[in-house]
Amino acid sequence: MSTLARPSFKEQMLAAREEAIIQNVNRLLAEKGFDAMTVDEVASAVGIAKASLYKHFTSKEDLAAAAMVRVMRRAQQFLKDVDANLPPLDKLKAAVRWTLQVQLAGQMPSLPGQNSSLRAALMSSRDYIDSRVEISETLGAWIEAAQRDGAVNATLPAVAVLYTLYARACDPVVEFLRGGGQLGDSEIIELVISTCFDGLAAR
């Protein structure tokens, strides 16, 4: 019976360094965005020379794309772990709540602009595209089920609802509310979820 060979010490060290690089890229993207982030900042944050960083990632776009793929994979795993017995609307709320928690933790990379070089890199990344498709299909199925249940407005195109939920990943309201200093993170999350799903009309 064959067994998988254990990674060598060198391979383990390279993997640990790559993990540190991606974590710091993720943080810098969340704090500053792609355009303001520099490769020098990433190397300094990790504590390595820029030449060493380029052994792992060949460009700033590759760095940012790796961080985006990592977040997408985390999202995929979260969606798989959501209780299958929950009503569709509760599944959608759970997904938005997770997104807001990641954003408030400073771990959500800023989404690239339409003409960004990062967007071009992401569109050529099979891992990113596959992850995005799987996430969209899962959320889309939940949206359509919630519409059939009458929990989400059935006259709205499902894709419009989907992108409304995606927009919560970069919702500036979250930072505005936090900056006000009057609300805790859990209160901010519930307020954003309430306005997202219930709207602003008086009930």
Image (cartoon, rainbow, N blue to C red):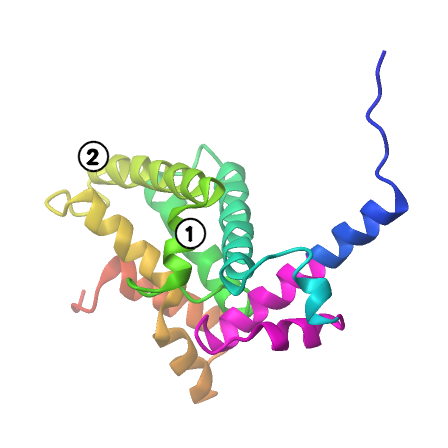
Q: Quadrant of residue 137?
A: top left
Residue identifier under label 2? 148
Residue type at tag 2: Arg
Above or below: residue 45 compared with residue 2: below
Whether residue 44 is in magenta: the answer is yes
Q: Is residue 127 left or right of residue 134?
A: right
Viewport quadrant of the C terminus = bottom left
Residue at screen point 84% across, 15% down: 2
Give the residue furthest to the front: 51
- Measured as percent of width and height from the top left, residue 179 is found at 45, 86
Give the residue furthest to the right: 9
Q: Badge 2: few (under 14), some or many (20 or more) residues near its Cα, within 10 Å?
A: few
Residue type at tag 1: Leu
Q: Which residues are magenta?
A: 19-48
- Measured as percent of width and height from the top left, residue 120 is found at 37, 55
Give whichever of 100, 50 is nearer the camera: 50
Residue identifier under label 1? 122
Residue at screen point 45% across, 45% down: 125
- Secondary structure beneath dot 1 equals helix
Residue at screen point 20% across, 43% down: 158
Q: Which one is earlier in the sequence, the residue at label 1 or at label 2?
A: 1
